[in-house]
Image (cartoon, rainbow, N blue to C red):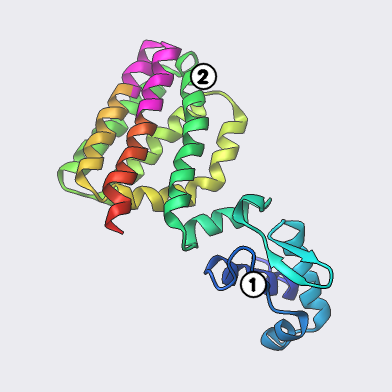
Amino acid sequence: MARKSLVGVVADELLDRIIDGEFPPGSTVPGEHELSARHEVSRMTVREAMKTLQAQQILSVERGRGTFVNPLNRWTSLEAVLRAASEGKNEAEASVQLIELRRMLETGACELAAGRISEADTESLFAYIAAMKAAHAINDVASFVEADLAFHDVILRASGNVFVSVLFEPLHRVLEKRRAETSAVPAIQEHAIGHHQNIAEALQSGDATRSRLAMDAHMQQTLDDLKNLVLPAK
């Protein structure tokens, strides 16, 4: 793996401080002199690092006032947003918004998959449900999450739309972390197994509307479980 440039290192460390909440939205970040002293680099390096974050709409410059942190919904870097979602302080909001995104994409993917899924893929879905049941029986959260993610991956691929899988690939790391948190609750595992069964049966029937509604019901249950069983415990 290639070493990051000094510009990249400074930009990453400043982004980490923003994500950690040291510089919340609307606050100013340190000036070039302070950052160059902190990182022991030239002011030109700091300037280029700041330009990198400005290009991603993470920072904005107001002439005569300073450089300010933009709210997350203005950031244009998917990688930076994912880092904020997986490492940031406002996990509750990020978790809810991630489910909202999944709902928009996965209900459509499931609808498409109903008319395109192969018999082999359908068999894989039921095999993953069996694996989820086995993991639930012994409260093996890691294995449960692995089977859960694999189940959804089959549907995304079966949709036949290449953009769906490409869009979901960067989300995988965040999804795995979030699933590990929610799936630690036995009741949530039970809910997920039931909904996965409904989704698999709907896809097996080839009914696009039924498949979309089954996935939508799963997303709603996931959101309800998050709000009622996970977030209050934090």
Q: Which mark is residue 112?
A: 2
Q: Which mark is residue 14?
A: 1
Residue 53's quadrant in the figure?
bottom right
Between discs 1 and 2, the one toward the N terminus: 1
Q: Residue furthest left?
A: 137
Q: Is residue 182 above or below residue 224?
A: below
Q: Residue at x 42, y 53 (%)?
A: 92
Which of 162 and 81 lies nearest the eye of the viewer? 81
Q: Quadrant of the C terminus?
A: bottom left
Q: Is residue 18 visible?
A: yes
Q: Around disc 2, counting alpha carbons within 10 Å, would you say few (fewer than 14), some (14 to 19), or many (20 or more)?
A: many
Is residue 98 toward the left or the right of residue 81 in the image? left
Q: Quadrant of the N terminus?
A: bottom right
Question: What's the CA distance linking mark 1 and mark 2?
Answer: 42 Å
Q: Residue furthest front?
A: 65
Question: Label 2 amino acid?
Answer: Leu
Q: Is residue 142 visible?
A: no
Magenta residues, as a range?
Answer: 199-217
Q: Is residue 206 magenta?
A: yes
Q: Is residue 162 magenta?
A: no
What percent of the width, then of the height, locates residue 151?
38, 33
Q: Is residue 60 above or below residue 102?
A: below
Question: Label 1 amino acid?
Answer: Leu
Q: Is residue 225 above or below residue 158?
A: below
Is residue 45 toward the left or the right of residue 184 in the image? right
Is residue 179 toward the left or the right of residue 90 in the image? left
Q: Residue at x 40, y 20 (%)?
A: 213
Is residue 81 toward the left or the right of residue 57 in the image? left
